[in-house]
Image: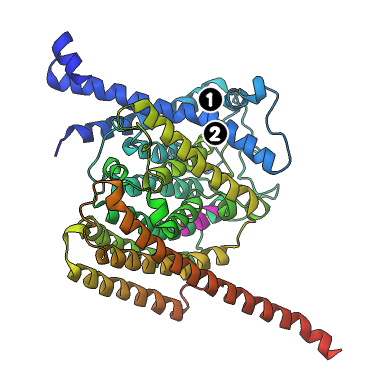
Amino acid sequence: MTDFLMDDIGLSHALAVLIAQTLGVFVVAMFGLLWTLLGIWIERKIAGRMQDRIGPNRVGPFGLVQTIADMVKIIVKEDIVPRGADRWVFNLAPILSVMGVMLLWVVVPFSAGWIGTDLSIGALYLIAAGSLGNIAVLMAGWASNNKFALVGAFRAIAQLISYEVPMVLALLIPVLMAGSLSTQEIVREQHIMYAIAVPLTLLIFLVSSQAEMGRGPFDLLEAESELVAGYQTEYAGMKFGMFYVAEFLHAFTAGVLTAIFFLGGWRGPWAEDVHILGFVYLMIKSMAAYFVLIWLRMTVPRLRIDQLLNFNWKFLVPVSLINLLVVAFVWKLIPDTDTINSLEDALLPTAALLVANGIMIGVIGWALRERGRRERARIASIYAQPAAGD
Amino acid sequence: MDLNEWVFVGLFIALAWILPATPIVLGKILGPKRPNPVKLEPYECGVETVGNTWVQFRAQYYVFALVFVLFDVELVFLFPWALAYNQLGLFALFEMAVFVALLIAALVYTWRKGALEWS
């Protein structure tokens, strides 16, 4: 693209780069937003089926244009700013919230040759850009001049920053195995997808990214029975719509990141040569991961705030720290892990890591079962006491 | 290092700003504007607001934030280690084992202190 602009049209190098990059930015960003339109429909359909409903089916064939109809509706709604709100912060929050998610798409490798830009610090960039959303939540809650919104924002921040720790610890493991922070490099190193070698890490990553986007069992930042709508309470019209778009896009992006770091990204038969094929593989893998996230959201009941924080600090964080040490130890134990260039090279480390993960999952499962048994016995004894006193 | 890749990020930030701002501005233009005092009240399920919103809240959140900062700073140290792990010897593993053991000790300490209890 840059070469074409320089040689055939005769632009200067700097200008050619700028034009080519602007086009690239538009393509990536537009893809993200247009996918949102389709994705919201997919999610509502799946959610409907899981709750024994039909889901949207009136507007267009199979309700496909429902999202566009919703957008038109929401755009002609009155924009209400509550009395006493901090206007600047209040208006900036929804924009920043979308921005924090869209920035993640910069380093998504769509295929062997298609990537926004292959930053050498890709994984670190993902964590940094992802944190913008947290600030947006706090801004929204603080600026609304509403006590529900403020309590919701405080809770949200406690949750978001807590679950960032196990998520980053889980991200460390693909980085360690690939020996690179660049997303494209991590995909290239996955001769066997990391999900097979380190399933425990994949689980930690899925659970903590579900909490990071405030969905499913972790949606108590907008627990409607106690906090109205949490930090979004005072938002109306398109500003609310932007929070909705951000939440949806974040959920799908979590699926994409899972696919990149654990499911081998665009890798698949002939994906190296035919770029469009790699893109299709990535989308299929992302949708699979995304489906699991929707599934979690629709079937697991909401946690309480103390349970939520206990689950993170007393279970996920210790487990991911030990997981990191075990994986690092096994990785050093196997010879030649620094020069994995083919499927055959990857077989031995993958098998060893799989065994180590199996043992870890077994021990954790056993500990959880024992804990559950003791807890049930304790509760049973509480209920048995008054009966004995009668 | 190629500076071009950061030009891309810069352009993306600009666009990621414009794209969500456009529908919001559009909504402002297209939507009706009929404010009245009751509509502009902060929403508290129909009850009138008492006092200021920006009052002191429980300090528990602050404790969790402190623990988070501790762990986040440690994580920054873990990244270069993971990045260079393939080139490092066995010594790096033991070094990091000591480091992570210290982290776990810190976690156990805060746990025993009761800082992780939500009461």
For mark 1, give the secondary structure.
helix
What's the magenta region? A152-158
Looking at the image, can residue A355 be seen? yes
Q: Residue at x 87, y 89 (%)?
A: A390
Rendered location of residue A102, percent (x, y): 40, 36
CB under 8 Å between callouts 1 and 2?
Answer: yes
x%, y% of residue A227? 62, 53
A173 lies left or right of A2 = right
Q: Which type of secondary structure does the marked residue at label 2 adopt? A: helix
> Which label sits on residue A241?
2
**Of the residues tagged 1 and 2, which is closer to the observer?**
2
Seen as rendered, the residue at the extreme top is A9
Q: Nearer the viewer, residue A199 or A249?
A: A199
Whether residue A38 is situated above or below residue A286 in the rendered picture: above
> Can residue B18 be seen in the rendering of this structure?
no
Q: Residue at x 61, y 73 (%)?
A: A372
| Dot 2 amino acid type | Gly
Q: CA distance from mark 1 to mark 2?
A: 10 Å
The dot on residue A44 is none
Same subunit under labels 1 and 2?
Answer: no
Is residue B38 within the magenta segment?
Answer: no
Three-letter code for the amino acid on which mark 1 is drawn? Gly
Residue located 23% across and 73% down the image? B94
Up-down relation of residue A199 to residue B16 (above or below): below
Mark 2 surroundings within 10 Å by alpha-carbon count, few (fewer than 14), some (14 through 19), many (20 or more): many
**Residue at the disc numbered 1:** B27
Task: Report the front residue among A18 and A86.
Answer: A18
Disc 2: which chain?
A
Camera-side residue: A25 or A47?
A47
